[in-house]
Image (cartoon, helix red, strand yellow):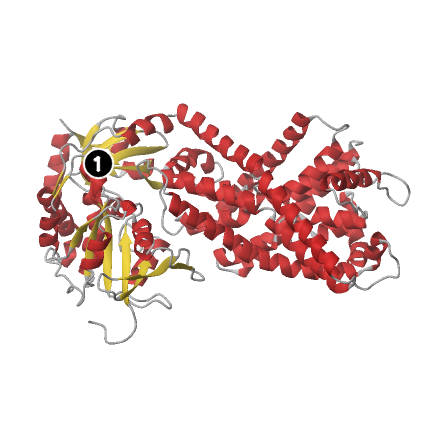
């Protein structure tokens, strides 16, 4: 399973949510880090689409029709790949 | 009938924050609700009564909003305890109503699945279907119900649509506990839940386009903008404060006048004596001193309610996160500190929304440093005394601004130091906030909220202030002297003697025994300072404005026994500094003890703030003297 994921990530050129430009739509590839459970509770799950609305100290993104503000440290744990 | 005993069936409302639980709770229970706070628990569970469609009595519990049953935060712990029947005085719920926001089912169904896995009978309230349909989401409640194995009721709680259907779904006998057929592998519970939700949403909640530009998005592009967002934020905050100070004065004058007339009327009906003095000077004057701030508190809560209910408050917390981090706090501390500008009591109570226990304690600790409305009477008496002549409104405003700034800056510095000393939290608390869509305010909810808070203020602050007013009255009245002169009587009384005793303590700050007495009496509530000075300097006038200017005249004419003026500008600045920093508010201490869960914290805060105020005033006076002021 991990090797498949690693392949996936390489193919999709995954980046963290912090690295995404504001206004871009992305798909969540993997959550990795100590706060994964918390993120999952809030709806950040693999395969879901989200749009980053603004960056900065905390970033705002729209996920499943809800806007969430999360800290940079949390966004660091969300690996995403661009859509389209 | 399923219940053999007379006890009503208990149903619990559970759901993510902003799913509409409280709206549904209010729609179900009407005005028939009561709020219960559990000592030592940071959040409250509301309970109320309702009737099912068949007339059976239901007890409805409104659990705090939570994202999962993992019990990460105090709210989630309370919700889990409530579901397991482990809360004191609350029975285990017979049925759980999972409230979900239909427009973000992918996120909200997580919690529902966890509740179903607990094995409690369950009904799904599919709230805000109007919002979901407006965004083009195609919902299939029947399919949802079939797949989940529980009744699903589409509804719109804020318009009271679907309430009857929900009550019909809570029929007797209660629906059987559903089978969590997706939970086949306990080791991968999370994954199987996720897979099931994805499949379920594809079947029963199809999204045409996940990202449409809604009105909220357009508003956010301005209100969360790095430049315009701040302009809007400052504009809103300025409007709130300006309105509180300008509109509250009308009802405040009315309350003041009404209590004055009540005092006169009671005075005229009673024979002269101690009882009359107790009722007029002790009880009515004491309660009046508290009630007079009610309009400001009501207005502040009205604005906070408006900002919260419209969805702006979380944006304010988001914007302020960077500023608050200077003090080692997060954006979530902004609302409590903002509320403290009206009164520290609601401010301390508002800290319940902060996840981190240590951040919460620090916020509680520094909240009283934000100058509250009770300090204003003292400031307004003293500030004109520093200025050479009457007038100069902008100079007064500037000094007042400086006073507020000094309080805020000190609060930030102390918070920073204290946060460092408390050490990091056991679990890291990242900044995490849901920004709900902008909505029109729900007036019924706001009015109820304002009324609840106002009543809490009157009841709690009122009882403590009443007791203290009676005590202070007794200290100022006994033992009695033969003199008719009120000033001499005060000097002879226990309070006057205490003043003499404490003069050596306050002399290094530039104060004499009379100011010392006024400070001492105002330890229970700051605004008592003015009334004590009126008694000490024997100011009596029916007209309040005349009384105030007369008091100011007498105060500026007061001298030490050797003829030197007592209230020099330096002494006044020293006194102002003392009032900015000292925690002279017993009701606040009482609330801090309750909210922090320990008397030690409240006592520590009181001693620290008083000590800090003393040292600060001492430094100001002694340094000022050194520089020849």
Which residue of the protein is positioned furthest toward the top in this rendering?
Answer: B227
B105 or B530, which lies in front? B530
Residue B390 at what x, y percent from top left? 75, 28
User: Who's the residue at 69% across and 45% down the image?
Assistant: B615
Residue B254: quarter of image: top right
Chain bearing mark 1: A
Q: Is residue B369 left or right of residue B322?
A: right
Whether residue B612 appears in this view of the structure is no
SS for tag 1? Answer: strand
| Closest to the observer, B604 or B351 | B351
Query: In the image, residue B256 lies at what x, y percent?
Result: 64, 46
Q: How many marks?
A: 1
Vertical side of B457 occupied by B382: above or below:
above
Q: Which residue is mark 1?
A: A79
Q: Looking at the picture, how far across and down is residue B182, in whole percent?
A: 11, 55
Residue appearing at x 16%, y 35% in the figure = B136
- Report which quarter residue B387 is drawn in: top right
**Which quadrant is home to the C terminus of chain B?**
top right
Identify the residue at horizontal 51%, vertical 60% (top origin). Answer: B598
For the residue carrying disc 1, how many other residues have a C-alpha within 10 Å: few (<14), some (14-19), or many (20+)? many
Residue B269 visible somewhere in the drawing:
yes
In the rendered image, residue B110, in percent from the top left (x then y), is placed at 20, 50
Residue drawn at 61 percent across, 51 percent down: B290
Against B40, is B154 above or below?
above
């Amino acid at each position: 399973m991990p090797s498949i994921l690693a392949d996936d990530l390489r193919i999709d050129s995954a980046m963290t949510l912090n690295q995404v430009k504001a206004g871009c739509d992305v798909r969540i590839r993997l959550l990795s880090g100590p706060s994964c459970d918390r993120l999952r509770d809030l709806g950040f799950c693999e395969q879901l689409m989200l749009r980053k609305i603004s960056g900065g100290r905390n970033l705002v993104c729209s996920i499943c029709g809800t806007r969430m503000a999360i800290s940079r440290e949390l966004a660091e744990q969300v690996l995403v790949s661009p859509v389209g | 009938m399923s219940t053999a005993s007379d006890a009503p069936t208990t149903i619990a409302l559970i759901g993510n924050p902003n799913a509409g639980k409280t709206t549904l709770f209010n729609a179900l229970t009407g005005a028939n609700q009561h709020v219960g706070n559990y000592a030592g628990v940071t959040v409250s569970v509301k309970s109320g009564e309702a009737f099912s469609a068949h007339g059976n009595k239901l007890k409805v519990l409104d659990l705090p909003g939570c994202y999962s049953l993992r019990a990460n935060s105090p709210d989630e712990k309370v919700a889990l305890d409530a579901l397991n029947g482990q809360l004191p005085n609350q029975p285990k719920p017979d049925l759980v109503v999972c409230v979900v926001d239909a427009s973000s089912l992918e996120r909200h169904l997580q919690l529902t699945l966890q509740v179903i896995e607990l094995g409690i009978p369950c009904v799904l309230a599919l709230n805000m279907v109007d919002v979901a349909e407006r965004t083009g989401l195609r919902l299939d409640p029947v399919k949802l119900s079939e797949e989940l194995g529980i009744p699903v009721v589409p509804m719109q709680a804020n318009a009271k649509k679907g309430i009857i259907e929900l009550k019909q779904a809570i029929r007797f006998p209660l629906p059987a506990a559903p089978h969590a057929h997706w939970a086949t592998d306990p080791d991968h519970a999370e994954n199987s839940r996720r897979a099931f939700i994805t499949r379920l949403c594809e079947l029963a909640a199809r999204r045409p386009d996940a990202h449409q530009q809604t009105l909220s998005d357009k508003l956010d592009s301005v209100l969360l903008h790095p430049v315009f967002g701040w302009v809007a934020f400052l504009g809103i905050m300025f409007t709130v404060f300006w309105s509180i100070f300008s509109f509250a004065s009308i009802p405040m004058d009315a309350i003041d006048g009404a209590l004055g007339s009540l005092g006169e009327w009671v005075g005229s009906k009673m024979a002269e004596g101690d009882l009359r003095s107790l009722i007029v000077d002790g009880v009515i004057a004491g309660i009046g001193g508290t009630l007079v701030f009610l309009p400001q508190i009501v207005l502040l809560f009205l604005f906070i309610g408006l900002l919260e209910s419209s969805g702006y408050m979380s944006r304010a917390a988001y914007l302020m996160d960077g500023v608050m981090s200077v003090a080692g706090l997060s954006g979530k501390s902004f609302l409590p500190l903002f509320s403290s500008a009206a009164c520290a009591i609601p401010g301390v109570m508002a800290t319940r929304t902060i996840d981190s226990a240590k951040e919460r304690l620090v916020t509680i600790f520094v909240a009283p440093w934000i100058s509250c409305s009770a300090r204003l009477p003292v400031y307004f008496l003293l500030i004109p005394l520093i200025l050479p002549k009457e007038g100069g409104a902008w100079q007064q405003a500037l000094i007042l601004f400086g006073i507020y700034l000094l309080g805020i800056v000190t609060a930030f510095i102390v918070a920073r130091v204290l946060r460092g000393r408390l050490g990091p939290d056991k679990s890291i608390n990242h900044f995490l906030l849901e920004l709900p869509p902008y909505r029109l305010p729900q007036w019924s909810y706001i009015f109820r909220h304002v009324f609840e808070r106002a009543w809490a203020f009157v009841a709690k602050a009122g009882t403590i202030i009443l007791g203290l007013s009676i005590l202070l009255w007794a200290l100022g009245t006994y033992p009695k002297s033969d003199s008719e002169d009120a000033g001499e009587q005060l000097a002879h009384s226990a309070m006057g003697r205490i003043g003499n005793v404490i003069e050596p303590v306050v002399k290094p700050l530039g104060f004499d025994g009379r100011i010392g007495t006024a400070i001492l009496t105002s330890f229970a509530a700051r605004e008592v300072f003015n009334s004590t000075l009126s008694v000490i300097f024997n100011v009596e006038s029916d007209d309040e404005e005349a009384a105030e200017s007369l008091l100011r005249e007498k105060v500026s004419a007061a001298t030490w026994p050797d003829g030197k003026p007592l209230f020099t500008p330096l002494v006044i600045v020293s006194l102002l500094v003392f009032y900015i920093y000292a925690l002279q508010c017993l009701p606040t201490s009482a609330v801090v003890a309750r909210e922090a869960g320990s008397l030690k914290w409240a006592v520590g805060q009181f001693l620290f703030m008083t000590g800090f105020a003393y040292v600060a005033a001492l430094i100001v006076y002694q340094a000022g003297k050194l520089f020849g002021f």
